[in-house]
Image (cartoon, helix red, strand yellow):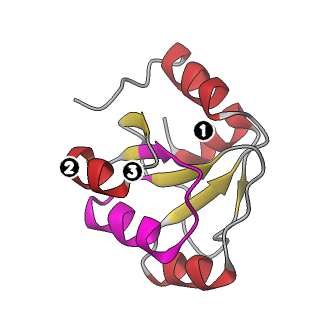
Amino acid sequence: MKVSELMSLIKARNLTGEVSTDKEVTCGYVCDLLSWVMAHGEEGMAWVTVQTHLNVVAVAALADMACVILPEDIVMEQESIDKANAESMCILSSPLKAYEICGLMSAQGIPANA
């Protein structure tokens, strides 16, 4: 599933309009502890988190994730959005709760990270 298809599934909007939504989502993950995500992050991952600071972008870019998903219409700070655009990291914001987002991804066959 591409990020653009995931956006439709979870009713998300792209906060980083300059970044392509053509990346393939290969797995999903939900966690707010950055050091834990650094240890478990994978290429192609769709990461659900409530964190919005610059380090989120750094961790996601380091692992070459497909996107970061902010649940419950959380909005990221402009400085972080600018950094995400510079790193070509797609940041989505969904009105759904993290639990709902993960359930929908799982129901569509997107596995948890390995």
Count neighbours of disc 3 (C-alpha within 10 A) and say few if under 14, some if 14 to 19, many if 20 or more.
few
Expressed as whole percent of the image width and height from the top left, the position of residue 1 reads: 48, 34
Q: Which residues are magenta?
A: 46-66
Which of label 3 and label 2 is nearer to you? 3
Expressed as whole percent of the image width and height from the top left, the position of residue 53 reads: 54, 72
Expressed as whole percent of the image width and height from the top left, the position of residue 67 reads: 48, 54
Identify the disc placed on residue 40.
Answer: none
The residue identified by callout 1 is 6
First-in-chain label (3 vs 2): 3
How many discs mark residues in the rendered view?
3
| Mark 2 residue type | Ala
Residue 55 painted magenta: yes
First-in-chain label (3 vs 1): 1
Q: For numbered disc 2, what is the local secondary structure?
A: helix
Is 59 in front, or is 13? 59
The residue identified by callout 3 is 33
| Mark 3 residue type | Leu
The residue identified by callout 2 is 39
Left or right placement of residue 111 versus residue 41 in this view: right
Q: Is residue 79 above or below residue 77?
A: below
Which of label 2 and label 1 is nearer to you? 2
Q: Determine if residue 43 is in view.
A: no
First-in-chain label (2 vs 1): 1
Q: Residue at x 50, y 83 (%)?
A: 83
Q: Residue at x 61, y 22 (%)?
A: 104
